[in-house]
Image (tube, rainbow, N blue to C red):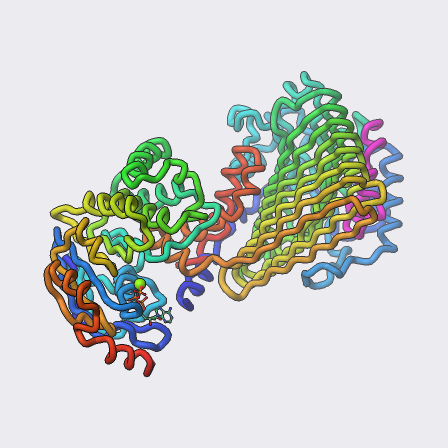
């Protein structure tokens, strides 16, 4: 489904991704771990098309199509979804209106009829229950005054509504209490299907008890330095990143920048 | 980051929808202004002697006045002798007696503008007075209004048919010498709307006027007078459009509102005059004086405005809160882009005890435009226990536009309380990215974000017009992201 080859990207002249290679097939769940500042969010944002980042080399193919040629919104319509690490607020725009606009944009792209307000309301209420968000959140401004955990649940609600082909979840587990972690994990597991892939960034192996990944990758210094099965996460938890010998080298590298 | 700003700038490029010219025969005065012109104007309108005298007095006063230059706007000097002071669609008879007599071309114009002029196309419950260039061409729903005792007609008719009311109130809120443009208007106003709501009557429908400038080189000087008698209520909406022309055109209106004891007036404006092209050529100069007097106790006047048009706007809908416990409100959305300039705001003059006012201003600047809020909150010595709440928010789209806030507070009463809040924000790249990541078009995203920013004001508009206002913002922002 997704094939990333030798991807390099920089922001404000500083190279962050230094040659990422990754193959993701439909139905798979990949976890990406790695130290702070290693480029995990950058990779997520670059895949989603954030123009703050410049791709300097490499290619990304999504279902045979060159992803990097597409605008952000076109990538979204082709099924790329990004759950943000830090969801932004849009004051005054109700969650409901925002979500309906998004869902209808996708439907229009697929040549389907747009959903009217009543139909959408019904659907949105169901999905909000699925992530344990009170339907009153639909009326509030997008992420406006939401707590950290509420924002994360709101992101998963959006993924459930938009039914993407590739869901990229950037630290959707961070800042969640134990119950919320369960709710969010259930949400993500509900997303799992034969024709959908999930790429999730996380720092904690405990999430991987709830959402069992097919592969775990370690991203450090802008490169994937180790890949393995889910046992890699356990090993990391036990031994820390120092075990992979990245700490010193990479710290030195970023200091040089 | 640069990319998004560029996109936003693309989005701001938009086409003016209402820029067509209607091909109808018109009677138009030669450009120029003197006492003869005023006398001719008055004669055409078959005005009584007192009206002509009133105009001439205003004219003489105006000659001694200077054009104001304190506003945060710049435009070339206007030659008041190059403007025609009267233009009317030619009609066989004096005035159309019913809609069937109105020139079909004219009706088509209003149809294009989406105005519910024809009763069979009525937008439920909205009575419309349509002013085309200088004259009022049709007033719908006269009958049901008459049944309720509400007078809703052109000001020309009112001068002839209800002289006592007009003489009693005209110029009491905005006198001749109030300011340069009001003085000019008093001398040459050609038409406008008159509303009188009798004691205890709740006006059975929204009243509305559409203004349209069609002829070239004409100025439009309409005059509106609304009187809400004791315990009455009226909601009034005006909308405005003009064709696209390379020359600038002048619009200098005066609106006077009078609310007696326990009366309420809600006045809403959706102003979409031609703003000029993307290089700043052409467009309407909108120099308007709007003021309401809450002369009765417990009376209330609310101004809601959505301003997206005009090359230069100079406008401060105000409330004089004389009656005890009277309330003044001002809700405003002003959007500028390209080279548009707006200096707009309000004045809340608290004279009576326990008077209250609320000001919510939302300024949106895009392109190279300049958007200024100018507000005065004044408490007289008798304004015991009076209070004001002001909130001024500015939203910037792109980085070549400007927003300015000029709040003035004058208090002669120690017990009066003012609260002031101001914010400036940008449509951020992160917000745009979030929307686009969810598959939403950049244009739609900007319009959605801007609409969200304006929500507090839109909710004050009558339902059908809130929708219209939202659409208008969308059109106004078209092309600002590509
Ligand atoms: N807009 C930006 N301007 C400057 N530097 C940036 C920008 N965005 C990211 N960076 C830098 O790129 C590097 C990688 O950041 P990124 O957010 O991808 O890390 P991460 O792996 O997601 O870290 P964390 O685990 O803390 O979320 C960091 O050094 C960060 O400071
Ligand atoms: Mg991150």
The N terminus of chain B - image quarter? bottom left
Q: Which residue is drawn at 65% across and 45% down?
A: B359
Using the image, determine if residue B162 lies above or below residue B217.
above
Judged from the image, the quadrant occupied by ligand 2 is bottom left
Using the image, determine if residue A71 lies above or below residue A159.
below
Does the segment drawn in magenta span residue B343?
Answer: no
From the top left corner, tell me how far across and down residue B364 is, in percent: 55, 54
Q: Is residue B190 toward the left or the right of residue B469 in the image?
A: right
Q: Which residue is drawn at 65% across and 19% down?
A: B143
Q: Which residue is drawn at 24% across and 44% down?
A: A187
- Which quadrant holds residue B304? top right
Q: Which residue is drawn at 68% across and 31% down?
A: B92
Residue B44 seen in this snapshot: no
Using the image, determine if residue B252 lies above or below residue B401.
above
Q: Is residue B197 toward the left or the right of residue B107 in the image?
A: right
The residue nearer to you, when weighing A151 against B217, is A151
Residue B435 seen in this snapshot: yes
Stretch in magenta: B163-186
From the top left corner, tell me how far across and down residue A17 is, in percent: 25, 72
The C terminus of chain B - image quarter? bottom left
Q: Is residue B350 toward the left or the right of residue A50 in the image?
A: right
- Which quadrant holds residue B320? top right
From the top left corner, tell me how far across and down residue B277 is, in percent: 55, 58
């Amino acid at each position: 489904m997704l094939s990333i080859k030798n991807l390099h990207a920089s922001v404000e002249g500083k190279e962050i991704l230094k040659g990422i290679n990754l193959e993701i097939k439909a139905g798979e769940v990949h976890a990406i771990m790695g130290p702070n500042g290693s480029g995990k969010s950058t990779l997520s944002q670059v895949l989603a098309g954030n123009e703050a980042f410049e791709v300097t080399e490499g290619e990304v193919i999504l279902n045979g199509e060159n992803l990097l040629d597409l605008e952000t919104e076109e990538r979204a319509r082709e099924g790329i979804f990004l759950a943000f690490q830090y969801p932004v607020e849009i004051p005054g725009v109700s969650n409901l209106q925002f979500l309906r606009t998004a869902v209808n944009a996708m439907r229009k792209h697929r040549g389907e009829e747009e959903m009217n307000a009543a139909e959408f309301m019904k659907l949105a209420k169901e999905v909000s229950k699925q992530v344990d968000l009170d339907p009153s959140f639909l009326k509030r401004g997008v992420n406006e005054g939401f707590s950290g955990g509420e924002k994360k649940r709101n992101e998963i609600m959006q993924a459930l509504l938009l039914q993407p082909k590739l869901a990229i979840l950037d630290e959707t587990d961070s800042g969640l209490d134990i119950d919320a972690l369960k709710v969010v994990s259930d949400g993500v597991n509900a997303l799992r299907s034969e024709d959908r892939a999930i790429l999730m960034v996380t720092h904690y192996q405990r999430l991987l008890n709830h959402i069992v990944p097919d592969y775990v990758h370690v991203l450090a210094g802008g490169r994937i330095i180790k890949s393995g099965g889910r046992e890699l996460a356990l090993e990391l938890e036990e031994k820390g990143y120092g075990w992979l010998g990245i700490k010193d080298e990479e710290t030195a590298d970023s200091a040089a920048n | 980051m640069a990319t998004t700003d560029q996109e936003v700038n693309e989005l701001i490029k938009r086409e003016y929808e209402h820029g067509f010219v209607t091909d109808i025969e018109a009677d138009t005065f030669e450009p120029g202004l003197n006492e003869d012109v005023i006398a001719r104007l008055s004669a055409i309108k078959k005005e009584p002697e007192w009206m002509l005298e009133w105009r001439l007095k205003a004219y003489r006063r105006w000659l001694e006045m200077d054009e104001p230059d304190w506003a945060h706007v710049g435009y070339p000097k206007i030659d008041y002798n190059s403007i025609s002071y009267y233009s009317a669609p030619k009609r066989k008879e004096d005035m159309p007696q019913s809609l069937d007599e109105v020139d079909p071309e004219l009706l088509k114009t209003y149809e294009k503008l989406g105005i519910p002029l024809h009763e069979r196309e009525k937008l439920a419950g909205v009575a419309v007075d349509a002013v085309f260039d200088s004259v009022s061409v049709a007033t719908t729903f006269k009958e049901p209004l008459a049944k309720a005792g509400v007078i809703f007609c052109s000001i020309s008719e009112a001068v002839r048919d209800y002289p006592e009311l007009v003489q009693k109130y005209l110029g009491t809120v905005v006198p001749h010498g109030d300011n340069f443009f009001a003085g000019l208007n008093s001398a040459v106003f050609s038409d406008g709307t008159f509303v009188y709501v009798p004691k205890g009557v709740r006006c059975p429908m929204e009243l509305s006027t559409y203004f349209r400038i069609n002829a070239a080189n004409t100025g439009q000087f309409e005059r509106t007078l609304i009187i809400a008698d004791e315990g009455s209520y009226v909601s009034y909406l005006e909308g405005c459009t003009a064709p696209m022309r390379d020359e600038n055109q002048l619009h200098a209106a005066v609106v006077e509102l009078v609310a007696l004891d326990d009366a309420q007036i809600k006045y809403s404006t959706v102003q979409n005059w031609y703003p000029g092209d993307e290089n700043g050529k052409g467009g309407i100069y909108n120099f308007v004086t709007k003021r309401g007097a809450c002369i009765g106790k417990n009376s209330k006047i609310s101004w809601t405005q959505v301003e997206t048009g005009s090359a230069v706007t100079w406008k401060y809908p105000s409330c004089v809160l004389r009656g005890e416990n009277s309330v003044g409100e001002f809700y405003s959305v002003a959007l500028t882009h390209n080279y548009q300039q707006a200096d707009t705001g309000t004045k809340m003059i608290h004279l009576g005890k326990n008077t209250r006012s609320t000001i919510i201003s939302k300024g949106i600047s895009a392109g190279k435009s300049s958007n200024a809020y100018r507000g005065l909150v004044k408490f007289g010595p008798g304004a015991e226990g009076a209070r004001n709440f002001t909130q001024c928010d500015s939203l910037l789209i792109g980085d070549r536009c400007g927003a300015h806030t000029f709040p003035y507070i004058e208090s002669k009463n120690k017990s009066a309380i003012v609260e002031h809040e101001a914010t400036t924000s940008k449509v951020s790249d992160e917000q745009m990215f979030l929307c686009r990541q969810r598959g939403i078009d950049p244009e739609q995203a900007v319009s959605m974000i801007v609409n969200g920013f304006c929500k507090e004001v839109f909710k004050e508009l009558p339902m059908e017009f809130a929708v219209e206002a939202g659409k208008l913002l969308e059109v106004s922002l078209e092309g600002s992201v590509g």
